[in-house]
Image (spheres, grey):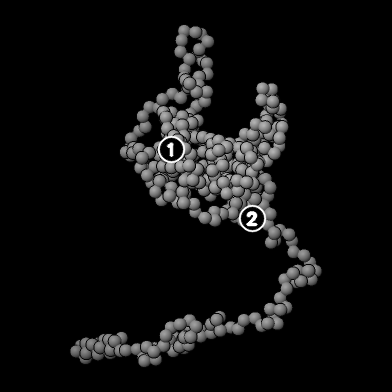
């Protein structure tokens, strides 16, 4: 028994000496660099010392002879067109159709829109600062397990002794021809934000002088960076000397980067230069989270794109514009709070 214990102690001491023994001097001196290290054989025999970096590149003769266009022309049998030139279907035929279009983020999609190429300052401020603040102001906590209170009737009943009121459809709310949008509790998923901005310009004398419509389109396109679309009259109005089908207005729709840049330009460069500017009217909403205001020709001339090229526009042909800001809010109070945080001033009685 004693001899067996002694042999086990000796073996353990020998193993400890092997672990503590210093490494060879060659391994201390070598530097492990992918380009100059050649000591793989010393470390392990299983590591392959041959690297892809040591393989020489193509010769000059191979580079000069490489011509993919000539190679495709000399090909006797042409490749199928759908192999490399994918074209998505023009119409969406449902989720069960075997030929599905690519997602809009795919460059081969028909709905692909390149960008964004930059992050506007106003959008960055909203994402980093304003969105958390709006969530704090609009959040209403409901403890878990609590049931929502009784909801008020959205439509009015027909009350009275008349026999015609029985089984009659409910009436619209008082003072409004349509129902208001349902308000969902504000969480981090549905913080109010901008959806789109529509810039519209109605030209009165476009029927008699088409140059006014062209000048208005040039001005709106310059300040919005979006190509305008021409709108025609839907019906004839004798008092306005307007006939159905006449081109009367230009408009453009801003989304994404152009939307944020345009609103930042209006708030930081145009509104501060208006003399005695009170702000946007507090009752300018449509009770669904959309607010509108307008600028006259004198104010449109203060946009930097028009002011720097003021001589390029004919005299007295710069139009006035109407700006409609659509938000994801469901009422005017939240939309006004969003625009106030973005820098748009309001005055007067706030109509919610």
State which quadrant residue 11 falls in. bottom left
Does residue 101 appear in this view?
no
Residue located at (46% from left, 29% from top): 283
The residue that label 2 is drawn on is: 108
Residue located at (55% from left, 38% from top): 298
Find residue 182 and report its horizontal and vertical position in percent. Answer: 46, 32
On residue 293, the disc is: none
Secondary structure beneath label 1 = loop
Q: Nearer the viewer, residue 94 or 275?
A: 275
Find residue 119 and report its horizontal and vertical position in percent. Answer: 49, 54
* Inter-mark Cα distance, 1 to 2: 43 Å
Residue located at (48% from left, 85% from top): 36
The residue that label 1 is drawn on is: 345
| Disc 1 crowd, CA 10 A, few/some/many (<14, 14-19, 20+) | some
Find residue 24 and report its horizontal and vertical position in percent. Answer: 36, 91
Image quarter where the N terminus lies is bottom left
Check the image and report above or below for 226 versus 169. Answer: below
Counting residues from the N terminus, which is met first, the one under dot 1 or under dot 2? 2
Q: Nearer the viewer, residue 298 or 319?
A: 298
Image quarter where the C terminus lies is top left
Find residue 40 and report its horizontal and vertical position in percent. Answer: 46, 86
Residue located at (53% from left, 39% from top): 299
In the visual, does 3 lie left or right of 163?
A: left
Does residue 123 appear in this view?
yes
| Disc 2 crowd, CA 10 A, few/some/many (<14, 14-19, 20+) | some
Secondary structure beneath label 2 = loop
């Amino acid at each position: 028994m004693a001899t067996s214990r002694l042999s086990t102690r000796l073996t353990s001491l020998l193993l400890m000496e092997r672990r503590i023994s210093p490494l060879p001097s060659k391994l201390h001196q070598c530097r492990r660099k992918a380009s100059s290290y050649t000591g793989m054989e010393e470390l392990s025999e299983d590591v392959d010392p041959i690297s892809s970096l040591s393989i020489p590149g193509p010769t000059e003769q191979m580079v000069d002879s490489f011509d993919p266009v000539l190679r495709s022309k000399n090909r006797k049998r042409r490749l199928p067109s759908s192999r490399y030139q994918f074209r998505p279907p023009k119409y969406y035929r449902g989720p069960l159709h075997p030929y599905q279009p690519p997602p809009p983020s795919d460059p081969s999609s028909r709905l692909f829109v390149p960008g964004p190429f930059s992050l506007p300052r106003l959008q960055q401020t909203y994402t980093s600062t304003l969105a958390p603040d709006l969530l704090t102001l609009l959040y209403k906590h409901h403890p878990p397990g609590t049931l929502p209170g009784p909801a008020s009737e959205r439509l009015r009943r027909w009350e009275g002794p008349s026999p015609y009121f029985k089984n009659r459809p409910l009436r619209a709310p008082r003072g409004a021809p349509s129902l208001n949008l349902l308000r969902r509790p504000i969480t981090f998923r549905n913080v109010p934000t901008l959806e789109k901005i529509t810039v519209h310009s109605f030209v009165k004398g476009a029927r008699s002088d088409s140059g006014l419509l062209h000048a208005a389109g040039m001005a709106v396109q310059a300040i919005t960076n979006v190509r305008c679309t021409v709108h025609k009259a839907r019906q004839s109005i004798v008092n306005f000397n307007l006939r159905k089908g006449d081109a009367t207005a230009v408009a453009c729709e801003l989304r994404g980067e152009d939307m944020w840049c345009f609103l930042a330009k209006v708030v930081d460069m145009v509104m501060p230069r208006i003399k005695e500017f009170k702000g946007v009217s507090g009752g300018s909403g449509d009770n669904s989270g959309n607010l509108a205001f307008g600028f006259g020709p004198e104010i449109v001339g203060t946009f930097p794109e028009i002011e720097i090229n003021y001589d390029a526009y004919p005299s007295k042909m710069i139009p006035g514009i109407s700006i409609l800001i659509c938000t994801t809010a469901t009422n005017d109070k939240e939309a006004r709070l969003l625009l106030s945080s973005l820098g748009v001033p309001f005055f007067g009685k706030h109509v919610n």
